[in-house]
Amino acid sequence: MSRRRSGVSDGNMSLTPMIDIMTTLLAVFMVTTPMMTTGIDIELPRAGTSAMTGNDHAIQISVDEKGNYYLLDTKLPRDEIVKRAIAMRGENPNLSITLSGDTHADYGAVMSMMGKLKDVGFQRVGLRTQIDNK
């Protein structure tokens, strides 16, 4: 004969609430991740017909049509951006930088930032463009 103890649970745990929470979190992250593209609104130049695979962990530096520099969406002087990039490289030695220049930006402003980054030792600096669909 089996005895039943009153007031003691049988140790089974219902997974349904946990699955519901995880599904909700997954849906929230799937919806919000595409909106996390940060930076300023610039018109990228068109170049080539194939896309390169890039590093999602790269620092995004932008130059607008007026020659202003931005780290993500924060407007900063060129030298301040370089200082912050050096500090970030201390945490991640393989850090890469993606430089986005507006189509109407001064070529000298874009190349000045690229040259300054190369001067302080960044070897992985790339220019971001749009795919030319013509």
Image (cartoon, rainbow, N blue to C red):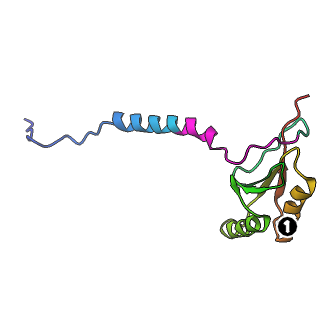
Tell whether 134 sits left or right of 128: right
Question: Which residue is depicted at the point 8% across and 38% down?
Answer: 3
Q: Quadrant of residue 2?
A: top left
Magenta stretch containing residue 47, yes or no?
Answer: no
- State the count of labels: 1
Question: Which residue is depicted at the point 34% across and 36% down?
Answer: 17
Residue on which the image places disc 1:
116
Residue density around tag 1, few if under 14, some if 14–19, many if 20 or more, within 10 Å:
some
Specify the quadrant that holds the C terminus: top right
Judging depth in this view, the residue of 71 and 32 nearest the camera is 71
Where is residue 85? Give x, y as percent: 73, 65
Where is residue 77? Give x, y as percent: 76, 64
Specify the quadrant that holds the N terminus: top left
Where is residue 37? Give x, y as percent: 67, 44
Q: Which residues are magenta?
A: 29-45
Magenta stretch containing residue 32, yes or no?
Answer: yes
Judging depth in this view, the residue of 105 and 4 nearest the camera is 105
Residue type of the residue flagged with mark 1: Lys
Tell whether 67 sits left or right of 12: right
Query: Circle 1 sits in a helix, a strand or a loop, which is it?
Result: helix
Determine the residue located farthest toward the front in the rendered image: 66
Q: In this rendering, is residue 27 above or below 105?
A: above
